[in-house]
Image (cartoon, rainbow, N blue to C red):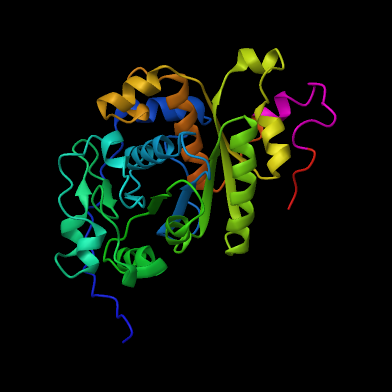
Amino acid sequence: MAFAPPRLLPLPLPPPPAAAASTRAVSARHHGGRTAPELSGPTPRVVVITSGKGGVGKTTTTANLAASLARLGLPAVAVDADAGLRNLDLLLGLENRVHLTAADVLAGDCRLDQALVRHRALQDLHLLCLSKPRSKMPLAFGSKTLTWVADALRRSPNPPAFILIDCPAGVDAGFVTAIAPAEEAVLVTTPDITALRDADRVAGLLECDGIKDIKIIVNRVRPDLVKGEDMMSALDVQEMLGLPLLGVVPEDAEVIRSTNRGVPLVLNDPPTPAGLALEQATWRLVERDAMTAVMVEEQERPKKKGGFFSFFGR
């Protein structure tokens, strides 16, 4: 007997409130005086945040992109697609408020609006977890699980502007489920050989699945090591992967404090270097822009010949 998807009842999202004064000030200072980015393309835009290798900051990136979108008045639904090992709720400070999940919706135990958890401080940010910790999705749901959820949100009277999917590490069934509804991808990597090899592999899989709009965020960059040629620069990473840069996030001790408090880094006041970098990456995501400043600044750096990645290519 063929499995028929359940009827999903979407949540009517509230109209976006005005951005906070501090947000307008920071945004204007770093974006040529503009106080809001220009949204590009039809909505909702479904973006998967992936990496291949675990531990490179993918979930942290998802939480901060979603929070920054909500601060800009762009409704966002952040989806934790890791069945059994979710962490996005912790980074958003919502771990005690997740009682229902997408698995419950698909099983017919609740409505979609009941499974969506609204952030305490950001009215335009909602969280949806795929399943509860230490549980597995029923096999009958298959890879179309998030496709059904995205379609239900798309049919909502007031659909979100963005659906951000936090993809689990690896390239197994969880990866296939997470990328199924996506039209765009943000590939998070660190400038080291193991992360870049996995990122290159994931980029190839995304392209094979029909996702052509892929941008990279280079995380945990240390300018002192880059200057001493002990770490690859963002330009090196961009050239190796052959993908446009969405952002470059410096190493920042405040990331650990922010994670432990369950408060996204972009909400810090005053802003930190990593928080500003993630906010700027959000602007580029909204406008479908790419980062060029770092590449221009590094053009004068001598190019190395050969190296670990001379075998890369798709």
| x then y, percent, for residue 184 | 52, 55
Q: In this image, 198 relative to 251: left or right?
A: right
Q: Residue at x 26, y 49 (%)?
A: 134
| x then y, percent, for residue 93 | 23, 34
The residue lying toward the viewer, choosing from 31 and 302, is 302
Q: Is residue 112 above or below residue 96?
A: below
The residue lying toward the viewer, choosing from 226 and 24, is 226
Residue 299 included in the magenta stretch of the image: yes
Q: Residue at x 50, y 58 (%)?
A: 41
Kindly report the secondary structure that dominates the magenta region of the rendered protein: loop
Specify start and end residues of the magenta stretch as a single range.
Answer: 294-309
Could you say which quadrant of the image residue 23 lies in? top left
Number of numbered discs on residues: 0
The N terminus: image quadrant: bottom left
Q: Which residue is drawn at 50% across and 27% down?
A: 30
- Evaluate whether residue 285 shows in this view: yes
- Evaluate whether residue 212 shows in this view: no
Q: Which residue is drawn at 30% across and 68% down?
A: 152
Q: Residue furthest right?
A: 305
Q: In this image, 99 relative to 194: left or right?
A: left
Q: Is residue 14 above or below residue 251?
A: below
Could you say which quadrant of the image residue 245 lies in? top right
Residue 57 included in the magenta stretch of the image: no
Q: Residue furthest bottom?
A: 1
